[in-house]
Image (cartoon, rainbow, N blue to C red):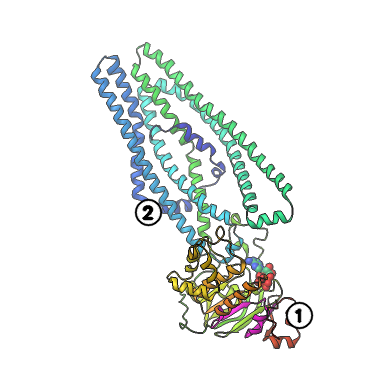
Amino acid sequence: MSGMTGMGAAWRHLRTDRSAVGSRVDPAVVRRVLGAAVPHRRLLAGFGTVTVLDALLVVVTPLLVQRLVDDGIVAGEVGVIVWVAVAIAGVALVDAAFGVLGGWLSARIGEGLIRDLRIQVFGHVQRQGLAFFTRTQTGALVSRLNNDVVGAQRAFTTVLSNVVANSVSALVVGITMLALSWQVTLLCLVMFPLLFVVSRWVGARLAVLTREQMDGNADLGNVMTERFNVGGAMLLKLFGRRTEEDVNFALKATRVRDVGVRIALLTRLFASVMLLVPALATALVYGVGGYLVVRGELTLGTLLALATLLLRLLGPLQGLSNVRIDVMTALVSFERVFEVLDLPSTVVERADAVPLQFAAGSRGVRLELDHVGFAYPDPATTTLASLETVGGADRGRGSEPVLHDVTFVAEPGETVALVGPSGAGKTTITHLVARLYDVDRGTVRVAGHDVRAVTLDSLEDVVGYVTQDSHMFHDTIGANLRYARPDATDEQIWAALEAARIARLVRSLPQGLETVVGDRGYRLSGGERQRLAIARLLLKAPPLVVLDEATAHLDGESEQAVQEALATALDGRTSLVIAHRLSTVRSADQILVVDGGRIVEAGTHPELLARGGLYAQLHGTQLVDDTPVTR
Ligand SMILES: Nc1ncnc2c1ncn2[C@@H]1O[C@H](COP(=O)(O)OP(=O)(O)OP(=O)(O)O)[C@@H](O)[C@H]1O
C-alpha cells in the first residue's frame, strides 16, 4: 500500500465529478453517514491502525537504503550489506501483508455498508404506494439502488484511506526529508506547485467532459432500452421511423466519440506532466545533492534516500489536495441514497393498525364504499423529480378529483360489475379496495373495517387481484404460483391449475411446473397468462376478488377456458369486476354504471336496460356479446 502510485490515485481524482465541491457540507448528512458506519466501528478501528502503520513504513526502506550505502557499500562492510538487505526484504513483506489486511478490512467495511444501504432502500421502496411506481422511471431507481449505493461506499472507504494514509505518509516523508537535508528538500518542493496548477486546470476541464460523457452514454443507453423491447420495437416498426432513429442515434454516438477523444487528449497531457515534474525534481535532487556529496556535506546514502523519498511524496500530496472532492463526492452519493430513504409513502400503515379478521371459509366478505372522493396524489409528493419518467411538468400542480361521492355495497358472495366509458374511473375504484391509494373523502370498508385501520398485510391477504395483464416474475411457473402461497404442495398447485383450466398446457410443457415464464421466459398467450394468474389467485384463496376482465378477443377455446376459470375463481367470493362481457353483467348481482367519476346508474341488467339510460347505450357498444347462441 505504501508504494501507492501517485498517478493512479491522481487520475481517479481528476475523473471525479467536481460539481459536488461547490456544495456545502451538511452536518445532518455527516451525522447520518457516521451513524451508518457505527455498526462497523471495530473493523474501522482495525482499518485505521493498519493504514497508519502502513503509511509509516513509507520512510523505512529509503532510510535502510541510506544505511546500506553509507555503512555497507561505502564502508566496505559486507555484514551490514547483508543485514540491511534482509531488513529491506522484511519491510517489503510486512508492507505486502498490511496491503492484504487493509484491503480485506476495507472490503469488509465497504461491502457491509453497501449491503446495509441496499437492504434499507429496497425495503423502503417496496413499501411505497403505487403512485410512486406509476411516476418513477425504473432505470433511474435501479441505478440509484446500484450506482449511488456503491458510489457512497467507495467514496466512504476512499475518504478513510485517503485522509488517514496520505496525511500520515506526507507528514512522515516530509519530516524525514527535511531531517536528511533541508536544503535539497525545500528546493524540490518548489517544483510541486506546478503539478497542482496543471492538475487543477486539467481536472476542471475533465469534470465538465466527464459529465458530458456520462450524459451522452446515458442518452445512448436510454435510446436503446426504450426501443429494444417489444413495445418500443413495435412502435418503431409501426411508424416506420427507422431512418430518423438511425440519424438520431448516430448524432448521439458522435457526441460521445468527440468527448472521448478530448478526454483522451487531456489524459495524455496530464500523464506527461505527472511524469515530468517528478523527473525534474529528481534531476534537481541528484544535481544539487551530488554537488553537496562532492563537497562532503551530504553522504551518498543520504542522497539516494532523498531521491527515493521524493517519489514517495508525490502520491500522498496529490491525494491530499483532493480530500475535499472526496468528502463532497461521498456526501453527495450518500445524500442521493438518503433522499430515497426519506421519501414518505403515500400509503402508510397506522401504528395502531389491527389485523383484518374474517371467518375462515366464509362466503366472501362485505365490501363497502361510503361517499368516497378521490384525486390521484400530487406528483410532487409521490416521487423524486430525479426519478421521474416524464419531465415532471405537472409536479406541484395537484390533481383533479377523479371520483366523486362513490357509494355502494357488495354483500358477501355478491358480484358487482363496473361498467362505463373509458376514463370514467372504474380502475381507480378497484385500486382503492386494497388501499393501493388512500381515499381523500369517505371510507372504504372491507369486512366492516376501514381499510386504513387494518394492517396492510392482512388487507392484502383478503383481497386478490386479476388484472388484464397480470405480471409474472421471470421464474418458474411453480415459483410464480407459490408467490401467492409459499407453503402450497404440488397437489394444491395442480388443483389450482386444474380449476383455472391451464393444467393441460402446463403438463404439455417439457419442463412442466419448472418452465420459466415472465419477461424473458416462455411466451404465454394473453389467455394463458390470465388463467395462470387465476390459478395464482385460487391458491391465495382471498374472500374478495377484484377482476379486470380481458377486453381483447381470445380465440374461442381460450375464451371459454378463461370464462370457466373465472367462474370457478369468483364462485363463493365477493367480487368487483370491471366488466367487458355481456355474460358477466347478466349474471352480476349488481351493475354500477360509472361516468365522470360518479355512479350514475345502479341495478341489475334487466332493470338498467329497461331504464333506457347510459347503460342501455353502452350495452350495445361496449360489452362483448359472448353469450352462447342457444336462444
Ligand atoms: N396514476 C394516475 N395518475 C393520475 N391520473 C390518473 C392515474 N390513473 C388514471 N388517472 C386518471 O383518472 C381517470 C380515471 O381513470 P381510470 O383508469 O380509473 O378509468 P377507467 O374507467 O378504468 O378507464 P378504462 O376503461 O379506459 O381503463 C382518468 O381521467 C385518468 O386519466
The amino acid sitting under disc 2 is Pro
Left or right: residue 496 compared with residue 376 = left
Q: Residue furthest left?
A: 79
- The image position of residue 32, as x and y in percent, is 45, 54
Is residue 350 at least partly visible in the picture?
Answer: no
In this picture, residue 621 sits left or right of residue 204: right
Q: How far apart are the alpha carbons under marks 1 and 2? A: 66 Å
Q: Position of residue 302 (x, y in %)?
A: 35, 20
Query: What are the residue bounds of the magenta stretch?
Result: 569-595
Residue 227 position within the rendered picture, expressed as x and y whole percent measured from the top left:
65, 52
Residue that badge 2 annotates: 39
Horizontally, residue 113 falls left or right of residue 625, namely: left
Residue 519 vs residue 591, the one in the foreground: 519
| Residue drawn at the location 42% of the way across and 49% of the way down | 111
**537 above or below 197?**
below
Is residue 173 shown in magenta?
A: no
| Some atom of ligand 1 lies within 8 Å of the CB belonging to the residue at label 2 | no
Q: Is residue 592 magenta?
A: yes
Residue position marked by numbered label 1 in the rendering? 617
**Of 3 and 307, which appears nearest the observer?**
3
Neighbours of disc 2 within 10 Å: few (<14), some (14-19), many (20+): some
User: Which structural element holds mark 1?
Assistant: helix
In depth, the one of 382 and 546 nearer the eye is 546
**Label 1 CB, ligand 1: below 8 Å?**
no
| Percent position of residue 96, x then y | 34, 35
* Front label number (1 vs 2): 1
Is residue 184 among the parts visible in the rendering?
Answer: yes
The numbered disc on residue 453 is none
Three-letter amino acid code at disc 1? Gln
